[in-house]
Image (spheres, coloured by chain):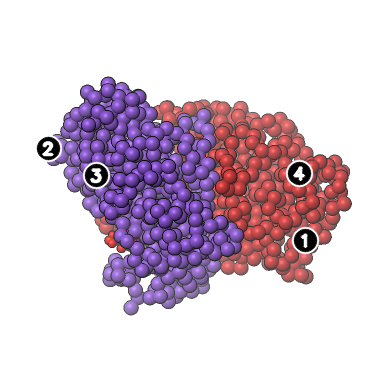
Chain colours: A purple, B red
Amino acid sequence: MYKERVRNAALWDRVSSAEDAAKLIKDGMTVGMSGFTRAGEAKAVPMALAERARTDPLKITLITGASLGNDLDKTLAEAHVLSRRMPFQVDPALRRAINNGEVMFVDQHLSETVELLRTRQIGPVDVAVIEAVAITEQGGIVPTTSVGNSASFAILAEKVIVEINLSQSDQLEGIHDIYIPSHRPMRTPIPVVTPESRVGLPFIPIDPDKIAAIVITEKLDSSSTVLPPDDETRGIAGHLCDFLQNEVKRGRLTNSLQPLQAGIGTIANAVMHGLLDTPFHNLKMYSEVLQDSTFDLFDAGKLDFASGSSITLSKEKYDDVFPRLSDYKSRLILRPQEVSNHPEVVRRLGIIGINTALEFDLYGNVNSTHVGGTHMMNGIGGSGDFARNGYMSIFVTKSTAKGGLVSSVVPMVSHVDHNEHDVDILVTECGLADLRGLAPRERAELVIAHCVHPTFRDQLRDYYQRALARGGHTPHVMEEAFAWHTRLAQTGSMLED
Amino acid sequence: MYKERVRNAALWDRVSSAEDAAKLIKDGMTVGMSGFTRAGEAKAVPMALAERARTDPLKITLITGASLGNDLDKTLAEAHVLSRRMPFQVDPALRRAINNGEVMFVDQHLSETVELLRTRQIGPVDVAVIEAVAITEQGGIVPTTSVGNSASFAILAEKVIVEINLSQSDQLEGIHDIYIPSHRPMRTPIPVVTPESRVGLPFIPIDPDKIAAIVITEKLDSSSTVLPPDDETRGIAGHLCDFLQNEVKRGRLTNSLQPLQAGIGTIANAVMHGLLDTPFHNLKMYSEVLQDSTFDLFDAGKLDFASGSSITLSKEKYDDVFPRLSDYKSRLILRPQEVSNHPEVVRRLGIIGINTALEFDLYGNVNSTHVGGTHMMNGIGGSGDFARNGYMSIFVTKSTAKGGLVSSVVPMVSHVDHNEHDVDILVTECGLADLRGLAPRERAELVIAHCVHPTFRDQLRDYYQRALARGGHTPHVMEEAFAWHTRLAQTGSMLED
Ligand SMILES: CC(C)(COP(=O)(O)OP(=O)(O)OC[C@H]1O[C@@H](n2cnc3c(N)ncnc32)[C@H](O)[C@@H]1OP(=O)(O)O)[C@@H](O)C(=O)NCCC(=O)NCCS
Ligand SMILES: CC(C)(COP(=O)(O)OP(=O)(O)OC[C@H]1O[C@@H](n2cnc3c(N)ncnc32)[C@H](O)[C@@H]1OP(=O)(O)O)[C@@H](O)C(=O)NCCC(=O)NCCS
């Protein structure tokens, strides 16, 4: 069966077991693996590596597109295989190893990793491990449900291991658009001028001699862990949709808006669902991960086109969408994350970026990554690529966490991923603050009026009043700026008694 | 004399006094004025406006390219003419008005202001006031020593006032390259592929009917306030040049490096001077402001080409350069700041950005704007455009300020303008930390070893050790994170006793 998928017959003799292929990876190496938002990760070789580490300990630097499914990061972390990991992850076991200092985690803007590799500021990549649906006659690699950084890993690595996954739909072939920016100083503009621009090849072009091993697998991608919309996320979506409709009324946007990017997770997915009940039409997405909501918007006739770097669906949605993928194919492109997130394209197309905050503050600074200012959650991901360079940067969050004991709207964020300059619109289920063109003192008034949960409103206003009395462009009571976080650590609640 | 400069004779009858022209500006209006890093600002009309406000109070929103010379921001602030100001300033009197809440200051990435105006997310601009060396036969406006946001102001404003400055060299004509990105969704790539790419017009193309008044002026630009290199700034330059030479040795850069951007101020200018004593050659700049060092590098045969948005020189350098501007003209371009700072071009060309920090922290977060976390200094300027999107982001600062009582290397910065993701290299006169590809705990070790001043080293290490004991990806003792800043406010020194 795999011979239909490995169309270059000269490569058939490279088919080997995952264990044998994994032997190409040696202690101390840097390995680039496919995988982006739990989609399209290499599945067999990393497992074999973890298995081998039980008897033959080794440490590697693992670089991926973004997060991995199938508990791979957990398995690798628990096998103590990871000395260094970049640029993103979402796994609780790996998170623990990062936060206790065992794994050095390098949290990067998703558009930047391969740029750093290409210029040899990090790396080099010794071995790339890429999941594929097929290898073409010329030896080109056809990725599966994600592109991520796979193309550059394969191009830059000395050796490439390909995992041909027979369970991944062969309908995926033709969906990918592999464009790699040229080396400087001869680099030319990236010719993407709309989300549907096809500017590259449908496979990763590499010298087939670099393919050192081919492993045949069958394991499916993990399903998305996104939860269905609830009252609060529906509230957030409602405020945001009202705001966007008002922008249309004021003549700033049309009913097709601008190309949309939506971050990972439950809240962003719920916000996209909210668009189902709006008058918007002929929408386009230029995003990273395409979640359930993308296909619901297609089915509802709201969405014309979606460009992303991966497809990550719930079990139900997967079973619905994949058998009829050909119905969607002309409306989908999967690109390298360097292109899906590229500052050049994000600014040119004028993306509306919708990302999720863990917490934000009076002045609109956003923390997306560090719980309590110190402990890594997932990473900044692509949020900074979009928030800095797009047309409009929106951050959403529930106003409270942990049963209402934690306010996600605080005097000063305990870690800054996106500063005031990169944050235009803030939304919680309580309301929306439009911060565009406003100075910090004006921003604070809106955040207090519209975003903070009523239980924390007086407390926040009190802080702000005392800060104002001290003056400054961005007033703060510095010695109290993190008092809410300190109180939480000591008492389990941010509430004053 | 002005008739040679106003080459469209139909406009001669619009010549008027500054007072009369200023009457076009009414209370509540938004005014876009030329001026970038104290170069090429409109000089007469704003003065007339301030004068009028003595007897006829009015308030405006003033948008410029960046900072203004000739004490204009001081005069306007003291006349209480400014209700709102964006996107940058450097004036002590205006700073006071901003910090006491009288003027609402909107501190923006310099590439973004006109994008927000064009999409009507801020504005509209009622009147533009643009300094020019000439108006062409067709009514095109030829700017003077800066382009800044002038082109978009003139294009977007309802009425345009042109100040023809007879003291500005007519040799400036031909130096500008005015390219304006088209409206979305039809926007195409910006065709700049090297610093010397000329892609636009040598004047600002507008309908001459919009020119409502022409004012003839003679006042010179203010001289730069940059101080000459001292031992510390020479030390910073030395560390940085050694580092860059090592990058060449490792084969990552050639001796022509990558196009250079250098921020405003004394330290950045000194660093550029440091390049005089290196083996580097055929350098290019793709920067914002071209300072004395640019011309010293030209004269030394080190620099091939410089693209910027303004020229700001010391008195001596001005008297040397401007009489023979034609010698430099083929090696200079002045562009709109939207293009000089554009994420698309900055990423494509692969700029090495060198900007100045007020303070940075253990993990490489940088504060460029807020003294003590609350009081605005100047603004973020273009530093974020380059730090986020370039090839390499370098931040420099002296390790201490205020006679050694203030450490510019702190446990946690009191305000974040550039976070860890956007900061590759940190330099003080003590040494250099290369943070590329490192996790926060590794970054902290280098910052302590190489950047902090010896007087503060033990204190910083002690903080870090205690933070480490609490764990986390980015360890902190949250309730002490700003203890150094609080101590400074209370005792006048960050030093523990
Ligand atoms: C911020 C982020 C973690 C939110 O994820 P989400 O699934 O939408 O949001 P949830 O509200 O379910 O929160 C996730 C967890 O954070 C916790 N949390 C939320 N706000 C918090 C706060 N202010 N303080 C502490 N914990 C908080 C929640 O309680 C929940 O914890 P649990 O997993 O133990 O239940 C996620 O969007 C993210 O990692 N973002 C950064 C990367 C990014 O933006 N990528 C986009 C492009 S790749
Ligand atoms: C950060 C910045 C203010 C430094 O300017 P500079 O002239 O090179 O540096 P200096 O060391 O002379 O410092 C300027 C002032 O800040 C003070 N300062 C420096 N570090 C400080 C610190 N850690 N805490 C408090 N004050 C500090 C200095 O004492 C000096 O004060 P003074 O004017 O009262 O003497 C300036 O570069 C800036 O505004 N940067 C932000 C914008 C930017 O980067 N633009 C680049 C592209 S436009």
Q: Is mark 2 within 8 Å of ligand 1?
A: no
Which tag, 3 or 2, sits closer to the chain's start?
2
Of the pair B271 and B73, the residue shown nearer to us: B73
* Secondary element at tag 2: loop
In the rendered image, which quarter contains the N terminus of chain B? top right
Q: Is mark 1 within 8 Å of ligand 2?
A: no
Q: Residue furthest top?
A: A10
Q: Which mark is residue A406?
A: none
Of the pair A144 and A489, the residue shown nearer to us: A144
Q: Would you say A15 lies left or right of B34 here?
A: left
Check the residue under mark 1 and report the chain it is in.
B
* Secondary element at tag 1: loop
Q: Residue at x 38, y 52 (%)?
A: A295
Badge nearest the viewer, 1 or 3: 3
Check the residue under mark 4 and report the chain it is in.
B
Q: Would you say A297 lies left or right of B376 here?
A: left
Q: Which mark is residue B140?
A: 4
C-alpha separation, residue under disc 1 versus residue under disc 3: 68 Å
Q: Which quadrant of the view contains residue B83?
A: bottom right
Q: Residue B432: x, y in percent? A: 42, 41
Q: Which mark is residue B24?
A: 1
Q: Would you say B377 lies left or right of A31 here?
A: right
Q: Which mark is residue A55?
A: 2
Say whether mark 1 and mark 2 are on the same chain.
no
Of the pair A250 and A101, the residue shown nearer to us: A250
Check the residue under mark 2 and report the chain it is in.
A
